[in-house]
Image: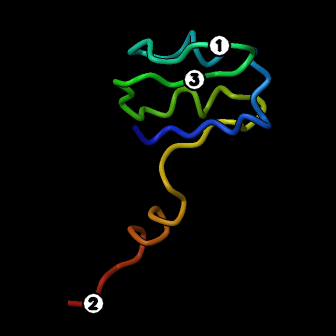
Amino acid sequence: MDIKIDLLKCTGCGTCTYLCPVGVLSVVDTKCQVQEGCISCGNCVEICSFKAITVGDPIMKKRTGKKRAH
């Protein structure tokens, strides 16, 4: 599961829960939570107005974006 939720930014609005194609997002105690089964599609990241959700590790994305010399 590569989805990360910043609980300081999350308002618990629930918008992301409606767009999750596998239904693993839910709002519990006014904060979004991710259950097992996330496919890291990014729908929740796109819809979150508060930028509280990210996919993956930003450091790893930077590393994998570089071309390696052979």
Residue at which label 2 appears: 69
What kind of residue is marked 2? Ala
Most extreme residue toward the bottom is 70
Lower position in the chain sequence, tag 3 or tag 2: 3
At horizontal 44% and vertical 22% (from top left) the residue drawn is: 35
Q: CA distance from mark 2 to mark 1?
A: 47 Å
> Circle 2 — which element?
loop
Residue at which label 3 appears: 33
Give the number of the disc on residue 28: 1
> Circle 1 — which element?
strand
At horizontal 44% and vertical 42% (from top left) the residue drawn is: 2
Q: Position of residue 60 (x, y in %)?
A: 44, 64
Tag 3 and tag 1, C-beta contact below 8 Å: yes
For mark 2, does the 10 Å Cα neighbourhood hold few (<14), some (14 to 19), or many (20 or more) residues? few
At horizontal 64% and vertical 13% (from top left) the residue drawn is: 27
Asked whether, in this view, residue 8 is left or right of residue 45, the answer is right
Q: Toward the viewer: 48 or 12?
A: 12
Q: Position of residue 14 (x, y in %)?
A: 68, 13
Locate residue 32: give its quadrant: top right
Locate residue 23: give its quadrant: top left
Q: Toward the viewer: 10 or 70?
A: 10
Lower position in the chain sequence, tag 3 or tag 1: 1
Q: CA distance from mark 3 to mark 2?
A: 40 Å
What kind of residue is marked 3? Gln
Q: Quadrant of the C terminus?
A: bottom left
Most extreme residue toward the front is 29
Q: CA distance from mark 3 to mark 1?
A: 7 Å
